[in-house]
Image (tube, grey):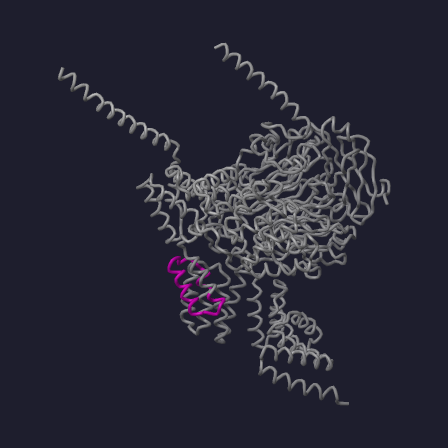
Amino acid sequence: MTAWCRATGFSFGVIAVLAIGWMRAAGTGARPAENVNLFEDVAAATGLDFQHFIGATGSYFQPEILGSGVALLDYDGDGDLDVYVLQGTILDRTKSLKDVIFTPPQKFRPGNRLFRNELIPTGKLRFVDVTDEAGVGGNGAYGMGVAVGDYDNDGHPDILVTNFGRNILYHNNGNGTFTDVTYAAGLEAESFYASAAFLDYDRDGYLDLVITRYNAFTVPGNKKCYSYAGGREYCGPGDYPSLSSKLYHNDGHGHFLDVSQKAGIAASVGNGLGVICADFNGDGWIDIYVANDKTPNHLWINQHNGTFKETALIAGAAYNGDGKALSGMGITAADFDNDGDEDIFVTNLTGEPNTLYQNDGSGIFEDVTNVFGLGHATLSSTGFGTSWFDYDNDGRLDLFVANGEVRTIDSQRGRSFPYSQRNQLFHNESATFRDVTAHAGPVFQVSRVGRGAAFGDVDNDGDIDIVVTNANGPVQLLLNQVGSRNHWLQALLQGVRTNRDGYGAIVVLRRKGRPPLRRRVGTDGSYLSAHDPRVHFGLGTDAELKESPPESLSVMWPDGYKESWEVRKPDRVMRLTEGQGKAVR
Amino acid sequence: MRVQKWLRNLLPHLASRAILTLSLACMLAFAQADLSGLPDLVSLQEIQQEEFEPAVGEQIRLAYSQTLHEPRNAEVVGRLGMILQCYRKYELAELCYRRASTLSPRSFRWVYYLGNVEGWTGKNHDAIDHVRKAMRIDESYTPARVRLAQLLFESGDMQQSLKEYEESIRQNPRLAAAHLGRGRVLAARGEWPDAIASYRTACNLFEHHAASHYALAMAYRKTGDEAKALEELDLYQRFKKTPQPAEDPLVDAINSLYAGGNSHFANGSSLAQQGMTKEAAIAFESALKVNPRLIMAHVNLIAIYSDLGLPDKAEEHFREAVKLDPGWAELYYNWGLLLFRERRFAEASEIFKKAIEVNPNYANAYVQLGQILDEGGRLGEAQQHFRLALENSPGNRQARYLLGASLIRTAQFDEAIAQLLETIKVDDDKTPVCMQALAVAFQGAGDVKKALYYTQQARERAITHKMDELVVQLQRDIDRLSAETKAP
């Protein structure tokens, strides 16, 4: 008995020492504290009350299983991020709400919704639906994706909505309202659109547009498709002819000209779902990467003369390392390994690993998925919205993936919407990405049908939050609970000669005694979504900050002009206006 | 005394019986204790409610009812797992294999299949454990070692993965997958020359091993040999649709269980590609017998019966398919082609319009409509349709050629030249005709020298492709044009 008590006392002692050690480790940024709520879903609590409606009537129309996206943008310029969410609709115009398989909830409102963030000036994170007064409820088409950019450089972010149907370009009037300028802009052609991005591909200072297209599905042409065993399922991408992406040149007067053929983009077809614009070959010009569903991905390299050349195959970015064209959906690009170039991560279907392409700096990629532990960890999920982001502000870019199936999950058969999966969170530990989903808190144990994901500092506390849309489900606002415990720095750029948003600019943070951190300015990537335009740097703990304080931020603007700013103190948003820094040769 | 002796004699007997009985009871108890963790098959009840292709449903339900009758028969349960896996129902297959391997722990197959399916669903650690367990039962089955190596690679354990690949190669040097896998590990470690050697071995073992050619291309590109990289990519593109070597007989046994119509359909497609039209028709008809909902089989049979000069049979399939699923633009297109061939232009026109209504991006349907309009002398409208085809499919050479030819007829020679120049960028058996049209366009534009040049080029190519009639025609054109160029 005595021996047993002694043994127990010893055990308690050991546990106590371990616990203290664990708590200390949480502060170093080396490995995340386990069993801590890294994120909490505060959508309902903050009034971000949105239920996506897929409009399914039993005909298995393809858009129903693919939409919809979300944008984070400061539409009213008050310094906090507002939320714009897209809505589905009943595609069969001969049917009505009484014919739908999933009856919308009581509070359901049709159309896209804009929620204004009242953090500024109230100090409280709270959202108010301002859709009607803003005039951005959509045009009745099936909402797919959203891109944000100040296309006319008037200082107010504009919105492009991609639809199954006709897209919408909303011009921000600067007074809380938008005007639908689609026809005036020349963007009214109908198709099955997916993700879009604003980019200045010709460096003329105006944001152009690239829009992916999925396939030639039409409602009258809806096919009956079946699973391998013969049960009715949504059709796959290849059941309809593939389409090319579209490139539009902004003429600076509010009009977008379709230059897809002239630019060479129309030469290759695919089932485009994700798009991201970055300088992949390091020549200072913006390139375009398109994730295609079951067809090879496209890497469009800017030829500096208004045209692009498709090089994904020889660049190693068309297929995965096994030479297979996977079901590319979501996409993110950033310098995850801090070697000064843009790497790419693409999300894929269940049974296919998400793919990590590491850039060698010249636009040549190698599939390093398994080297970094992202292979088997992602095999059991169908990934959509994704981004690299530093959730714990330790200076390394982590990964989040919004998951949700597109085919019936056998174990959920019999449920009304049997496609639910859990989202995933991976912590960047330099040599590997560790799956921390199981330890990230209850919100990561919830299974939904994840689609879009927009990343940004919604509560302005210095860490990155995530808004996730779920097919036929509620929007989630995953508020980061841990990042703000460490130090950070954000930068909001304003172009003067270049596009006002500074899209395509590269921001480099120099720190004493440590490698620089590099971020690209843009709101594109993920899936059907648009992010916070501020670039974000995690600076680590007090000790790490003291050891390696930030020294300067340098910006290479899209036209190649470089300048820098001294960083005097961390934990703030620096506003960097072109021409107001110190020129760098 | 006698009783005591009798008792003394009986006791050992009783004792030995008791011992025996106790032993048996212990064994039974032990056996039952072993099976106390036996996964049940309750979840499989959902199968009863699922919709299947008829032959597939019959196969699955028969196998399932057999398991209900013999729930402790590992073979029966395991076979159900194999059938479920064949139809990509991995979760349910895993359940069956888990049960079968518990019922028959010394069986290599069930625990190997369990590990395999766990690997495909991302449960790598469990998969590695189970494949290792299978190998402890029988380490002579090399594909299992290759699978283990692959799982270790996916888990990021490069060292162990390499060890297993190398042992696999030692056991069976002719497994292309083992050499490919070894190469992948070496590449991940940055050992490019050795990786290239491994990939090269895989390609030498099986020339059509597409994945190895791709890996080799990436390796050459990494080491700066772009020319070789392009060569290998070319081979990869050529072989990627070729059936790959069957190197795991146990996994192939699963695939061979497929009872649906798709295997007949795939066979039919292969026969059709080889030009064996009658045999292809038989295969597609077989596919429909197994699965009457296989619309693509109907689509293909419309085209095949049209080629075979059996329009009634083609129409039968068209009508049947439209009843099944009117959303297939290809149905209308193929039927429209038959009507076009029979010069039933009015009907063909309506059918192609229907194809476009179903798929407004259907380039080939626009092309056919354009041809009908062209036949009817409505050249402007015809050109409009060819342009629509090109808008949807800029690479559609036929649309570009027809547009060019039509523009010649409306004396729009400059635009005709621009369109037709695009059509000769590819050098094949259509190029002579395209060049001939281009020559006519140049002549119309007044450039007789260029007209002569392209006519000569066309003739050379026509000779190469043994197009005798065209060669004669082109020679006459050359003679005429030559005379024109010499004329004062």
Extent of the magenta region: B271-299
In x, y percent, where is residue A373?
A: 60, 40
Q: Is residue B289 magenta?
A: yes
Q: Residue at x 57, y 38 (%)?
A: A423
What number of labels is visible?
0
Tell which of A386 and B369 is nearer to you.
A386
Is A377 situated left or right of A83 in this image? Answer: left
| In the depicted structure, whether residue B391 falls above or below residue B456 | above
Query: Farthest residue toward the bottom?
Result: B488
| In the depicted structure, whether residue A421 falls above or below residue B287 | above
Q: Residue at x 37, y 38 (%)?
A: B103
Tell which of A254 and B302 is nearer to you.
B302
Which of the image's four quarters has the N terminus of chain B? top left
Is B454 situated left or right of B69 in this image? Answer: right
Can residue B306 be seen? yes
Is A222 situated left or right of A192 in this image? Answer: left
Query: Farthest residue toward the top?
Result: A2
Majority secondary structure of magenta residues: helix
In x, y percent, where is residue A175?
A: 73, 41
Can residue A258 be seen? no
